[in-house]
């Protein structure tokens, strides 16, 4: 188009505008007109080719994206089927392998739907993983150790995304707290831990600490919203207190400041404490000792 503009400009500059009709007829018979026509035809052809190339590129990109999405879903279905077999006769993959696969899929996901799908499978897997801490073994995490470590990696990489799992986060939190309490047991022989623990009525608790003749039940609530935490805490303590026909006392461990009043804590024979990491171990130890002294 630039060439056409230049040719027309030069031609018009030399034209006799008073005799424009004659000039136009002469120009249309000249080689210049043929050149202009050729340039225009080339420009039209180039535009058509460019449009076709753009369409082809768009189709190719769409095909590549579709193939990539299909491949992602195929891998997801493979992992989900082996994580949660439809038949009890099917042998599932080790949880740590499935969790690592889902972590990779969550990282490669391109849509919120894909990330959410990973989170739901992780939810189901996490519900079957209960940290079992052996306080006397050289490998205190035992056979669940690799699964919890895989969950910890998944939680770290998926945090604040649609792939995050609050259930997985709770399992990891409980495991880290159990290891912190285990360290207390090694330093203080008057503490005897059971993880998980059994209540007198046969129900399983997160953990039990025997302090002398007093049993202190550890209840862990991985809730980060203060208002919801308060309601959850009261519901748990009411349920425990209603079933308690013995001298059990309770320590409620949460990741944020406990939302219980002193009167509520006294009513339910409970002490609430925040634990965010090993640096809070002494606070948990103090809470256990205070709970053991409750009347």
Image: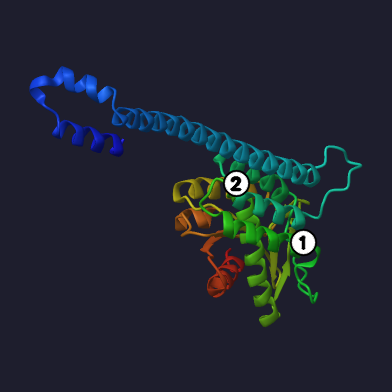
Q: Residue furthest left?
A: 18
Q: Is residue 74 above or below residue 28?
A: below
Number of disc labels: 2
Residue 286 position, x and y percent, is 55, 72
Q: Is residue 15 left or right of residue 179?
A: left
Q: Is residue 180 above or below residue 187?
A: above
CA separation in Å, label 1 and label 2: 28 Å
Q: Which mark is residue 109?
A: 2
Q: Label 1: how many residues lie within 10 Å, few (<14), some (14-19) or many (20+)? A: some
Q: Quadrant of residue 130?
A: bottom right
Residue matched to label 1: 144
Label 1 or label 2, whichever comes before in sequence order: 2
Residue 188 position, x and y percent, is 67, 80
Q: Are marks 1 and 2 in contact (CB under 8 Å)?
A: no
The structure residue drawn at horizontal position 46% and vertical position 29%, both measured from the top left corner, is: 48
Q: Nearer the viewer, residue 7 or 172?
A: 7
The structure residue drawn at horizontal position 66% and vertical position 82%, both measured from the top left corner, is: 187
């Amino acid at each position: 188009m630039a060439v056409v503009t230049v040719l027309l400009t030069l031609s018009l500059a030399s034209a006799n505008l008073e005799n424009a009709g004659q000039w136009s007829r002469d120009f249309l018979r000249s080689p210049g007109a043929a050149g202009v026509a050729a340039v225009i035809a080339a420009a039209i052809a180039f535009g058509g080719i460019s449009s076709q190339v753009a369409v082809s590129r768009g189709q190719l990109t769409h095909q590549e994206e579709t193939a990539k999405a299909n491949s992602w879903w195929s891998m997801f279905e493979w992992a989900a089927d082996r994580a949660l077999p439809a038949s009890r006769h099917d042998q599932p993959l080790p949880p740590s392998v499935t969790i690592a696969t889902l972590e990779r899929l969550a990282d490669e996901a391109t849509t919120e739907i894909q990330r959410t799908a990973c989170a739901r499978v992780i939810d189901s897997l996490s519900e079957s993983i209960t940290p079992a801490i052996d306080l006397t073994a050289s490998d205190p995490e035992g056979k669940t150790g690799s699964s919890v470590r895989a969950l910890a990696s998944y939680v770290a990489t998926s945090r604040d995304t649609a792939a995050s799992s609050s259930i997985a986060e709770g399992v990891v939190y409980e495991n880290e707290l159990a290891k912190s309490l285990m360290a207390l047991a090694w330093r203080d022989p008057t503490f005897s831990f059971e993880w998980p623990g059994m209540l007198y009525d046969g129900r399983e608790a997160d953990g039990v600490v025997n302090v002398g003749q007093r049993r202190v039940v550890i209840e862990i609530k991985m809730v980060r919203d203060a208002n919801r935490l308060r309601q959850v805490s009261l519901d748990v303590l009411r349920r425990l207190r209603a079933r308690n026909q013995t001298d059990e006392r309770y320590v409620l461990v949460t990741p944020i400041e406990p939302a219980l009043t002193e009167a509520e804590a006294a009513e339910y024979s409970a002490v609430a404490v925040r634990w965010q990491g090993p640096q809070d171990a002494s606070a948990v130890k103090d809470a256990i000792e205070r709970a053991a002294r409750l009347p």
